[in-house]
Amino acid sequence: MVSLSDALLWIVVIILVWQLPNRLLSKFVRRRVQVMDPPIFGRILNSSFRKSLQPPEKVLRRSGVRRGETVIDLGCGSGALTLPLAEAVGPTGLVLAIDINESLLRQLLDELSGRSDLSTRVEVIQASAHDLPLRDSSADRCIMVSSLQEIPDRSRALKEVARILREGGTLAVTEFFVDPDFPLLSTTVRLVEGAGFRVEAKEGSPWSYTVRCIKTSVDSRGINTRELPGK
Ligand SMILES: C[S@@+](CC[C@H](N)C(=O)[O-])C[C@H]1O[C@@H](n2cnc3c(N)ncnc32)[C@H](O)[C@@H]1O
């Protein structure tokens, strides 16, 4: 019989063994080069255990997704959020599921092949967040769930998101502490504000949060920065 203190100790050891090498990888490698997650990550991300810890419906509610919208799932991975998102936008909406990792996108395509009711609402695109193959102002909303910190040049990716969102469109960044790349809420706020977004809401808790922010060219002084010389 395992005592409660032994069980807690094991949980702490497992978290440290999982988090430490990944945090080091994140700090020293991911900032410099693009790292591809192995296919097993796709299975873990799409598992019912993960969904019980971080229910997709809750993430989408915090992200403010509405019916009829065109929504980008940026860094969609194996699609844990993509299918619930396709349900949430309804038959008149569209989901653009974008990721750089082909093996994870194949897992999403496999899932979609069994969902003819949803597959017509989803376009799967292999691309880097650094250079999105989308027109300016072509989307209403972009969700990034545990993906922003995996992108080597996060500022460049956020500028791309700002480019493809329409004026008044929303970016929702969700982070969860079990992710080894987990950033503090203040870090995420600094990043999105640095890319010119206005934070509209911070939902959830410090260890499981969504930052919802708006693309606007009107700054806090009420000045339209698009009209300024040099912009
Ligand atoms: C932790 S996974 C999250 C996947 C999914 N959003 C979810 O919550 O299940 C992070 C994802 O970001 C993707 N990613 C990393 N760098 C990227 C880049 N430069 N462009 C697009 N996607 C990227 C990875 O391939 C991976 O699928």
Image (cartoon, rainbow, N blue to C red):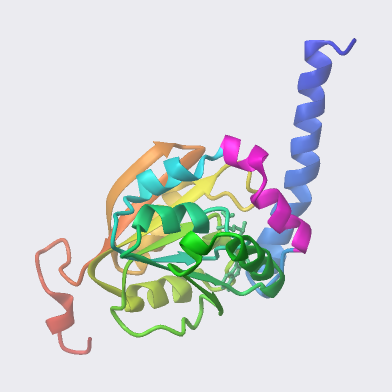
Task: From this view, report whether residue 192 is shown above or below residue 227.
Answer: above
Q: Quadrant of ligand 1?
A: bottom right
Residue situated in front as seen by the camera: 58 or 2 = 58
Is 141 on the left or on the right of 9, as rendered? left
The quarter in which the N terminus is drawn is: top right
Magenta stretch contains residue 227? no
Question: Residue at left 59%, top 35%?
Answer: 52
The quarter in which the C terminus is drawn is: bottom left
Q: What is the magenta segment's predominant secondary structure?
A: helix
What is the quadrant of residue 25 in the picture?
Answer: bottom right
Q: Position of residue 115 (x, y in %)?
A: 55, 59
Task: From this view, report whether residue 174 is shown above or below residue 93.
Answer: above
Task: From this view, report whether residue 163 is shown above or below residue 92.
Answer: below
Is 67 on the left or on the right of 108, as rendered? left
Q: Which region is colored magenta?
A: 38-53
What is the quadrant of residue 218 in the picture?
Answer: bottom left
